[in-house]
Amino acid sequence: MAAGVMRRVSGGCRYGRFSSSFSSGGGERARSRFCPPAGSRTDWIGPPDKRSNLRPVIFYVPPHESPLERRLRELREETQAWNQSFWARQNTAFQREKEEFIYSRLKAKGLETRDETGQKVTLNAEEMADFYKDFLHKNFRKHMHYNRDWYKRNFAITFLMGQVALVRALRWLRRRTKDVGNQ
């Protein structure tokens, strides 16, 4: 298979050297059904992941990818997987803790999780505000470390993107100068 050519493989797709599977936080690999059409020459953004709510990206692999371009793409893929993993874990913990909070508050009031018509019983906005405040406070350090690492990764990606753009511009200028000299 030539780099940059997409083909389907066991439940996912392969686009160059990148498979559309990613770690969803619990160590298992999730498979996206999203797969760009064969012959595409651009990155593709898929539908939001059920756990992380982030849209996965399948990065285009050009046929003659330079080592610098490859480093950039691999860093972007690694950052995407890291981001997916963090938000899948965080959102799963949020949902679990929210359900536990609601259950404990309803139990303290002597209520069941469903009313007599079978409808789910909810708490009012003020009661839920207590949960949100506590959750954010409890996870403050985790979010602070995430933000710090996210900025580091994005700075590295931006720096590599600048290097790739500069190399491409210099290559274009050399070609153009060579073409003008041959006339």
Image: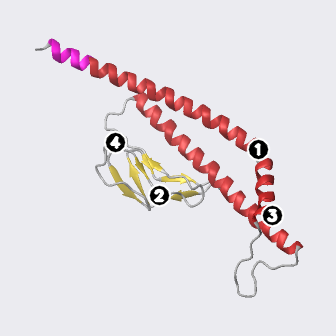
Helix, strand or loop at disc 2?
loop
Point out residue 65 in the picture as x, y percentages from the top left corner.
36, 33
Helix, strand or loop at disc 1?
helix
Question: For the residues marked 4 and 3, what is the alpha-carbon distance in whole angstroms?
Answer: 54 Å
Q: Are marks 1 and 2 in contact (CB under 8 Å)?
A: no
Question: For the residues marked 1 and 2, what is the alpha-carbon distance in whole angstroms?
Answer: 29 Å
Nearer-the-camera pick, 29 or 141: 141
Disc 4 designates what residue?
3
Q: Earlier in the sequence, mark 1 or mark 4?
A: 4
**Numbered badge on residue 140:** 1
Point out residue 5 in the picture as x, y percentages from the top left corner.
32, 47
At label 2, which amino acid type do we have?
A: Pro
At label 3, which amino acid type do we have?
A: Glu
Q: Residue at x 30, y 21 (%)?
A: 171
Question: For the residues marked 4 and 2, what is the alpha-carbon distance in whole angstroms?
Answer: 24 Å
Q: Residues within 10 Å of mark 3 (few under 14, many from 20)?
A: few
- Which segment did they paint magenta? 174-181
Q: Earlier in the sequence, mark 1 or mark 3?
A: 3
Helix, strand or loop at disc 4?
loop
Q: Residues within 10 Å of mark 2 (few under 14, many from 20)?
A: few
